[in-house]
Image (tube, rainbow, N blue to C red):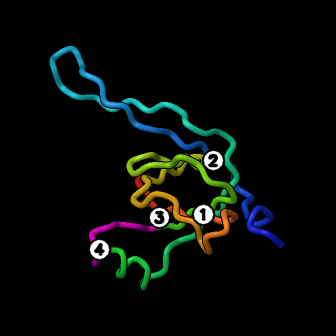
Amino acid sequence: MGLLDLCRRTVTIRRPTNTSDSVGGVVASFSDQFTNVRVSVQAATADEIETWSRRGVQISHRIYLASSLDVRLGDVVIDGSVTYRVTAPPFDMGDRGRAFKILALQVQ
């Protein structure tokens, strides 16, 4: 069984773009970067949350991908009615190009 078999959820990954509003303020708008991405979402363990917190990174979930995507800090992952903000970009688990993990914080 490969990682793709465990990736049963389909999400959309969106990227924020800052634009100026009519009074000179900054407004973030989001545009789809990737749609219909198969992932597995798992809650982070207490140990993981503590370890990453010491590094200044807030996480609540791990998101696993079976392919490498240009996901960046600040991107959001939309899983139905739940939104996660990417707090650490994907890293290759095992350096084989087969499994990638994103650290994220649930915001809704």
Rounded to the nearest whole Å, what is the CA distance between mark 2 and mark 3?
15 Å
Q: Amino acid at mark 3?
A: Leu
Which residue position is annotated with label 4?
55
Tell me, yes or no, whether the two marked residues, 3 and 1, touch with CB atoms within 8 Å.
no
Among the two numbered marks 4 and 1 on one chain, the one whose residue lies closer to the N terminus:
4
Instruction: Give the extent of the magenta segment.
Output: 53-60
The residue drawn where x is 52% and y is 59% is 90
Among the two numbered marks 2 and 1 on one chain, the one whose residue lies closer to the N terminus:
2
Which residue position is annotated with label 3?
103
Mark count: 4
Rounded to the nearest whole Å, what is the CA distance between mark 3 and mark 1?
10 Å
Q: Is residue 108 above or below residue 21?
A: below
Which residue position is annotated with label 1?
100
Rounded to the nearest whole Å, what is the CA distance between mark 2 and mark 4?
28 Å
Residue 35 figure quarter: top right
Q: Is residue 33 above or below residue 95?
A: above
Q: Amino acid at mark 4?
A: Arg
x%, y% of residue 86?
A: 44, 55
The residue drawn where x is 24% and y is 19% is 21
